[in-house]
Image (cartoon, coloured by chain):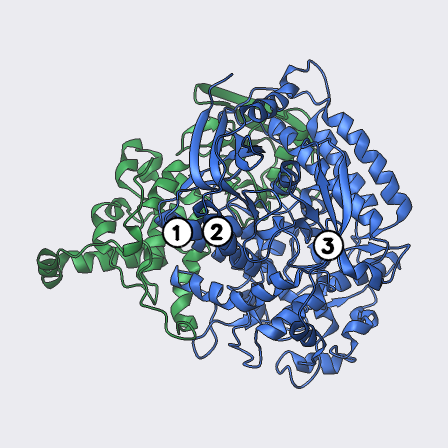
Amino acid sequence: MAEVTMKVWRGDANGGDFESYTLTQNEGEVVLDVIHRIQATEAPDLACRWNCKAGKCGSCSAEINGKPRLMCMTRMDQLPEGEVTVTPMKTFPIIRDLVTDVSFNYVQAQKVPALLPPPMPEGGYRMFQEDVERGQEFRKCIECFLCQDVCHVIRDHEDNKASYSGPRFFIRYAELEMHPLDQNDRRHLVREEMGLGYCNITKCCTEVCPEHIHITDNAIIPLKERVVDVAYDPVAWLGRKILRRTNRSAADADVQPAP
Amino acid sequence: MTDYEHHEYDVLIIGAGGAGLRAAIEAKQRGLSVGIVTKSLLGKAHTVMAEGGMAAAMGNVYPEDNWKVHFRDTMRGGKYLNNYRMAELHAKESPDRVWELEQWGALFDRTKDGKILQRDFGGHRYARLAHVGDRTGLELIRTLQQKVVSMGTDVYMECKVLKLVHDADGRVAGCVAYWRPSGEFVTFGAKSVILATGGTGKSWKFTSNSWEGTGDGHAMALWAGAQLIDMECIQFHPTGMVWPHSVRGLLVTEGVRGDGGVLRNSEGKRFMFNYVADMFRAETAETEEEADKWYDDHTAGRRPPELLPRDEVARAINTEVKAGRGSPHGGVFLDIASRRSPEFIRRRLPSMYHQFMELAGVDITTDPMEIGPTCHYIMGGVKVDAETAATLAPGLFAAGEVAGGMHGANRLGGNSLSDLVVFGKRAGMGAADYVESGQAATTLDMGEVEAAVKEALAPFDRASGENPYDIQRDLQEMMQVNVGIIRTASELEFAATELDKFTERVKNIAVKGGRAYNPGWNLTTDLPAMLTVCRTVTRGATLRKESRGGHTREDFPAADPAFAKFNFAHSTNGGNWDSPIDTVESPLLEMPDDLKALLEEDH
C-alpha cells in the first residue's frame, strides 16, 4: 500500500507549527478518515471538529492544501500526489489545532429578523413548488462557514467583521426576502448594517460551497438589486421617513444582544 | 472546594437536536428562563442526518389518512411493545407540529395544489411523510434553531455534560459539565432538567451515528435514578453504505425505496417477496406487477415488500448475504436507476446522488447502490410519562431518541422526526408545569459535583495506561459481533463477561495532552456512558427469549406472546457507571378497548 504524509497544523492562539504524520493510504478514504487514524494512534489529542462524516452537518471545515473544504468530502485519491497539508480556517480565531472559534457566525445569526408570516389558515398555508424552490436552494446550507472563510472582505480585513455578515447570511436574507409567506422587510438592514455593499461578487464563496448553492448569482446579486431598488426609490424613501418602518418582527422583541 | 463557573435556569435542556430545541421553545414561551447545553455546535446535532421525512397524518396526498391509521401503523410496526399512549398522542399531534414548523420558516416540498407533499415510507399505510427532498432533518433543525435564536435563548455550545447532580432531597437539580474548548468545568443549577441527548449507535462498528451517539443521556438518567426500558430493541437500518470501507454504515434513505427503488440479490432477483411475514401478508403485494402498480395508485395494488418495516427488511438482507447471494462488498443491491429517470432521481434524492457520486464514485442514476444493514436507532430509552415526559427521577424529563416507549420494538421510518417535535413540546410543557408547581429542586449537592470532576481528571494522573481509542474500537467490534442484528444466548453471555473486562480497562485509561479541546479526553468521558448502555442492551437481549422487532434471537426465532406483556426495565442503586444494574419486568400500559379495536381494523 502507498504511504501518504500529512502535514497538520498544530497549535493554539499562542502559535503553532506543522507536524508531519506518515501513514499507509487505504482505499476510498477521505481526509477526515486519515485525521481520525492519526488521532487513534499517534496523537489522541489532535483537535478537529466533526459530526456526521457525510457532508450534512458542516462541522469538519478546514483548508486542505490551502483550499477551504470539508474534510469528510475530500477523497485522498483525488488530491495531487505528495504531501497533504491540513490547516484550520484562516478567517476565524484558532482554538486548537484544526478547531477555530466560529462564534462570529452565531452572532450574525442573532441579528437576523425572523420570518413574519400571516396567520395560518385552516389546513395549512398554500405555497407552490416553484415558489418555495428558490428558498429551498439556500436552505440546503449546512453552515460549514467555508464561504465566510474564503470571503476576502473578512479573510483579509479583520476590522470588517463588525459591519459585514458575509455570504452565509446574505443567502439567509435572500431566502427570507424570497419566502412566499414573509411580510418583513430587511432590505434597509442588509444595506446599512450587514455590509452587502462590501461584496464585489468575485464568486469565491460560490466556488467553495460544498452544497453547490449559487450564492452569488441566485442570492447576492438579486439581493443587491432589491436593496438598490428600495434605497434609491424616492417614494420608498419618503415612506420610510414618514412611517418610520421598522425591520423587526414581534418575535425579535427579546433577541438578546450578541455576547 | 473549588469555585466553578455556575449558571442557573428554570429549565435546563441537555442536547440541541430536534427534541431539545422544540422543548426550549415551549419552555421559553411559558416565560421561563431556559438554557441549552450541547456538546457540539448549534445546528450540528444528529437530527441533520435524518433524510426521508417526518410522519404526520395530514391527509394531503391520501385524504383517507388520519391519526387512527397512523396509530395502528406505529403499533404494528413496534410489534405492540409500544407505550400505546405515546403512540396515540404522537399520531394525533404530529400534523400540528409540522404545520407549526411552516410558521417558523420551514419550506417543505409541495403538492400540485400547494399543500405539503407527503411521501411513502416503510410500514406507513399511506404516503405520510412531509419532506424536503432527502434533507428533511436539516430543514427541521435549522427551522427550530432559527426560532430558538430569535427568541434569545442561551445556548452553551461544545459543553459536555458529565453527570446529573441532585439536591439534598434527591431531586435532580442540575448537572456538572466541562467546556470542550478550554477544558474548564462548569455547573448548571436548574429547577428541572430535560434530557434530549439522542441515541447510542456509536457503540457498534457499523453505524449511521456520529461521534455524539454515545448514550450519554441514557446512562445519566440511569445513574440519576430513572429507569431504562426496551434497551435490547436496536434498529439496524436496512440500507447503509457498505463500500468504500471508510464510509461503511453511512445512511441511505428509505426514501429511495419509497420513491420506487427495489432490493436485488446477486442473481438480480427482487428477493423481498420471499420474506413477507404472516402479520403483513394481507397488505403486501405478491407479484412485481402488483407492487409496481401501487406506486402511482395505492388502491390499484398492495404495497411492495421492499416497504415492509425496517426490522423485516434488515433481517432479509442479512439472510441473503449469509446465503451467498450478496454483492461484491458484502451487501445487496438497491436499484432505482433501472426504474426511474435520472431527472426524477436527482430531484427527489439529491443528497443520495451527491453522497454516492463523491464518496463511492457511483452514479445512482445509472448504477445500483451496494447497501447493507447499519446500526441506526435505539427504540429503548428512559421510561417516561406520555403526557409530561417525566422520568421516574423527580425533576428529570426526557424526549426524543433518549426516551423509550414510543416506538416499541421497532420504529417506523419518519416517526422519529415527528417524535422529536411532539414529545419535545410535551417535555417543555411537563418541565414548565413542574417548575410552576413549586416542588422543584434547590441547590446542587457539591459532593456529587466534586466526585464527577475527580473522576473526569483521573486519567490525566495515570503515568501509563490504555489509549481510549483502542478501547472504543474493541468495544464496537465486540458489540457488532455479539450483540448485533442476530443474537444468541452463548454470544450474549460472552458479551456480558467482556463488558466487565472493558469496565476495568476504562479505569486504566491514561490521557495524553492537556485539557483544552482534547478529543482523547472527551472520548474517555464518553466511555462510561457507552459501557452502561451496552450492559443494559446485553442484559435485555439475554432476558428477552424471543424475537420481536429490533431484537432477533437465533435461538428463539419466533415472537412469544408471553413476552408481549412487559418491557424489561433497568435501574441502578449505586448511581455510578460501574454500579450493579437491576432488571425487572415492567408491565405495559393497558390499552383501552376502542384503541385495541383500531389495531384489528382493516383500514
Residue A136: horizontal and vertical position, in percent? 43, 61
Quick one: label 2, few (<14), some, or many (20+) residues within 10 Å?
many
Q: Which mark is residue B236?
A: 3
Q: Measuring from the top left, give residue B157's x and y in whole percent.
A: 47, 37
Which label was assigned to residue B10?
Answer: none
Residue under mark 2: which chain is it in?
A: B
Q: Secondary structure at mark 1?
A: loop
* Residue found at x 76% / y 40%: B582
Label 3 vs 1, first from the N-terminus:
1
Q: In which image quadrant can residue B411 be found?
A: bottom right
Where, by quadrant of the figure, is residue B405 drawn?
bottom right
Location of residue B51 with respect to B397 vertically, above or below? below
Chain ID, green in image: A
Give A244 or B452, whichever is nearer the viewer.
Answer: B452
**Looking at the image, is B112 positioned above or below residue A258?**
below
Answer yes or no: do the residues labelled 2 and 1 have beta carbons within 8 Å? yes
Residue A14: x percent and y percent? 43, 19
- Between A32 and A105, which is closer to the camera in this rendering? A105
How many angstroms separate mark 3 from mark 2 (CA)?
A: 30 Å
